[in-house]
Image (spheres, helix red, strand yellow):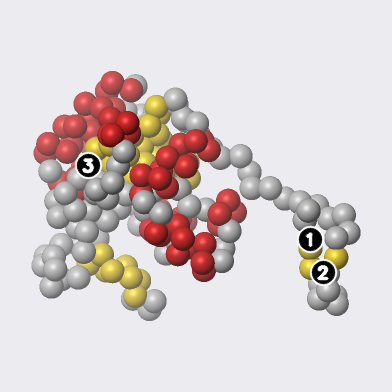
């Protein structure tokens, strides 16, 4: 049963009212679930309400936000049909749209969504916190079940509790080197080549 609030009096009513479901999720044949921290930049990223995202220079001196993005651009240039899904806490803060603005157009145009979306999950603070506490592999797996891509991979540094049956779908990064690691780049290219 759907209840709506009557705006003129503030009382609840169960009168017939339009119910707007979230649109069906966008999907593609091959999707890559992409984390930001520890993949496109050093893992020492913090969030401040006024300053926004920044890299703690005490933990990662000399590192900058999105410093390894060009490695992803170079890799995906050979796989034009791969689509991206943001699988990061950046979906919550600063939010999906603002997060994508940090990326070059060549990558932004490949995104079809994120693992968290207010229209799907809701906007209550307790929902945000519950999502943050959910293991990354489960956030991704829930999205896979919803979008139903033919093939999928995840590029992430949050890998400690991945189930054995999904390890073939994971390209694991070291949070200190992310996608700057040549062996990670090679593994990503190799796994994408098998799927496309």
Residue 135 shown left or right of residue 190 in the figure: right
Q: Residue at x 61, y 39 (%)?
A: 24
Where is residue 180 shown, x and y percent of the image? 15, 46
- Label 2: few (<14), some or many (≥20) within 10 Å? few
Please say if the residues under marks 2 and 1 sit with CB atoms less than 8 Å apart.
yes
- Label 3: few (<14), some or many (≥20) within 10 Å? many
State the residue lying farthest toward the right. Answer: 15
On the image, which quarter does residue 173 sit in? top left
Residue 128 shown left or right of residue 189 in the figure: right
- Label 1: few (<14), some or many (≥20) within 10 Å? few
Secondary structure under the numbered disc 1 in the rendered image: loop
Quadrant occupied by the C terminus: top left
Q: Residue at x 28, y 34 (%)?
A: 164
Q: Earlier in the sequence, mark 1 or mark 3?
A: 1
Q: Which mark is residue 12?
A: 2
**Residue with the mark numbered 1:** 3
**Residue with the mark numbered 3:** 172
Q: CA distance from mark 1 to mark 3?
A: 44 Å
Q: Is residue 184 above or below residue 151?
A: below
- Which residue is more in the foreground, 158 or 69? 158
Q: CA distance from mark 2 to mark 3?
A: 49 Å
Secondary structure under the numbered disc 2 in the rendered image: strand
Q: Which mark is residue 147?
A: none
């Amino acid at each position: 049963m759907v209840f709506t609030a009557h705006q003129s009096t503030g009382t609840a009513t169960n009168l017939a009212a339009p119910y707007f479901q979230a649109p069906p999720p966008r999907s593609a044949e091959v999707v890559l679930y992409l984390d930001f921290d520890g993949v496109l930049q050093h893992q020492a990223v913090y969030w401040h309400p006024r300053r926004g995202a920044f890299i703690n220079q005490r933990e990662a001196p000399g590192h900058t936000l999105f410093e390894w993005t060009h490695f992803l651009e170079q890799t995906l240039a050979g796989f034009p049909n791969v689509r991206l899904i943001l699988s990061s806490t950046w979906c919550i803060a600063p939010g999906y749209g603002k997060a994508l603005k940090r990326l070059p157009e060549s990558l932004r145009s490949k995104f079809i969504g994120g693992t968290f979306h207010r229209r799907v999950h809701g906007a209550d603070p307790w929902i945000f916190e519950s999502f943050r506490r959910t293991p990354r592999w489960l956030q991704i797996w829930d999205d896979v079940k919803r979008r139903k891509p033919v093939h999928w991979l995840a590029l992430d540094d949050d890998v400690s509790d991945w189930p054995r049956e999904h390890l073939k779908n994971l390209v694991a990064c070291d949070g200190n080197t992310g996608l700057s690691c040549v062996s990670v780049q090679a593994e990503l290219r190799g796994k994408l080549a098998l799927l496309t």
